[in-house]
């Protein structure tokens, strides 16, 4: 009974002292954990408490604009340390400002890339169709460079990167996808995959083709591997099927053309696997 009473007083006193010294703890470098669309901040806080004993740490949900602060407190039972618990405290005002800036910067990026002004039009001299991405690393890289040259997009993403570094250098930025469109009406997605600080203080952003995201004007999914060509593809005109046939040749797939393909709809059926895959192309109406 005496031990239990002593432990209760000791634990309560420990929490009181830690709460009173939260300003001093803010001098330490706090860890920041991301939990977007978090179902339970308290559960994650308890999991991280032992790693942050006597130090404040933050759990942030950038998508929903929520930040919570905690201190890891040693848990003692019968005069023995058995673990740690998380004590929620007030978010430091300076950190709250940094977090608010991060949320605002992210919202600006999302609003921009979800708007048509955030889409990138690919000049025909780089690529005329999403099918030009299929099997061509050179085209994929050239379009990634083109996205980086979009000054307004780069400015907004760079502002977001700076805001994230201000919150925590190791913060996960999440996923950002940029829509690119081609002259023939096809499209694909590119993903922000890297950021590197340059000597002049700017960010070198890396955008990579998101395989499986390409769609042509006939809603065919652009194949990004030989095996993905298996099946039937339908095209409306000869001009629409030609980039597809070029993609087949880059993968070394043999194509047999039956009759003329000057009138649509045009079907291409690919069967077999690996080096044995063969495709047949023909016009349905002529």
Image (tube, helix red, strand yellow):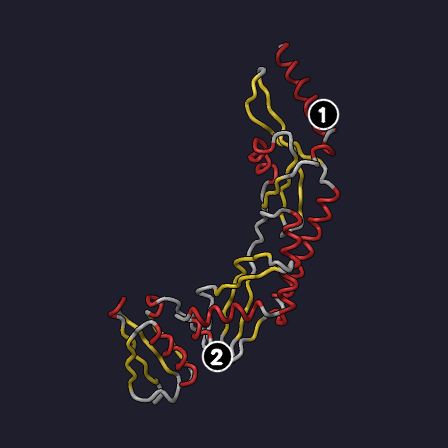
Please report contact status of discs 1 and 2: CB closer than 8 Å, yes or no.
Answer: no
Residue drawn at x 29%, y 85% is: 258
Q: Which mark is residue 17?
A: 1
Q: Residue 193 carries which label?
A: none
**Residue located beneath label 2 in the image:** 128
The C terminus sits in image quarter: bottom left
Residue at the outermost front position: 199
Neighbour tally class for label 1: few under 14, some 14-19, many 20 plus, Cα within 10 Å: few
Q: In which quarter of the image is residue 131?
A: bottom left
From the viewer's side, name the closer residue of 44 and 169: 169
Position of residue 128 measured from the top left corner of the image (x, y, whole percent): 48, 79
**Does residue 274 appear left or right of residue 129 in this picture?**
left
> Could you tell me which secondary element the residue under label 2 belongs to?
loop
Q: Is residue 278 above or below residue 5?
A: below
Residue at the outermost left position: 276
**Does residue 51 appear left or right of residue 248 in this picture?**
right
Position of residue 171 measured from the top left corner of the image (x, y, whole percent): 59, 48
Residue drawn at x 75%, y 43% is: 93
The N terminus sits in image quarter: top right
Position of residue 68 measured from the top left corner of the image (x, y, whole percent): 67, 41
Residue at the outermost top position: 2
From the viewer's side, name the closer residue of 285 and 114: 114
Q: In this view, does 175 lie above or below 135?
A: above
Residue drawn at x 64%, y 65% is: 112
Q: In this view, does 1 lie above or below 250?
A: above
Which is more N-terminal, label 2 or label 1?
Answer: 1
Residue drawn at x 58%, y 28% is: 84
Neighbour tally class for label 2: few under 14, some 14-19, many 20 plus, Cα within 10 Å: some
């Amino acid at each position: 009974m005496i031990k239990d009473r002593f432990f209760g007083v000791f634990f309560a006193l420990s929490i009181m002292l830690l709460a009173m010294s939260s300003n001093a703890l803010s001098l330490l470098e706090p860890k920041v954990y991301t939990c977007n669309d978090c179902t339970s901040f308290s559960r994650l806080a308890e999991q991280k408490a032992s790693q942050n004993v006597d130090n404040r740490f933050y759990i942030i949900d950038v998508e929903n604009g929520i930040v919570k602060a905690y201190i890891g407190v040693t848990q003692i039972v019968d005069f023995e340390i058995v673990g740690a618990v998380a004590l929620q405290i007030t978010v430091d005002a300076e950190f709250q400002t940094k977090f608010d800036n991060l949320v605002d910067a992210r919202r600006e990026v999302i609003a921009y890339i979800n708007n048509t002004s955030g889409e990138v039009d690919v000049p025909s001299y780089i690529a005329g169709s999403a099918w030009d991405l299929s099997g061509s690393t050179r085209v994929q890289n050239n379009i990634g460079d083109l996205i980086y040259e979009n000054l307004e997009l780069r400015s907004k993403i760079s502002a977001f990167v700076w805001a994230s570094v201000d919150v925590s250098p190791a913060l996960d930025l999440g996923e950002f996808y940029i829509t690119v469109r081609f002259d023939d009406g096809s499209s694909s997605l590119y993903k922000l995959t890297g950021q590197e600080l340059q000597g002049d203080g700017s960010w070198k952003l890396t955008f990579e083709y998101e395989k499986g995201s390409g769609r042509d004007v006939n809603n065919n999914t652009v194949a990004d591997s030989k095996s993905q060509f298996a099946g039937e593809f339908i095209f409306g005109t000869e001009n629409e099927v030609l980039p597809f046939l070029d993609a087949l040749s880059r993968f070394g797939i043999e194509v047999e053309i039956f009759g003329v393909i000057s009138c649509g709809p045009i079907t291409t059926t690919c069967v077999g696997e690996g080096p044995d895959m063969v495709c047949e192309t023909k016009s349905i109406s002529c």
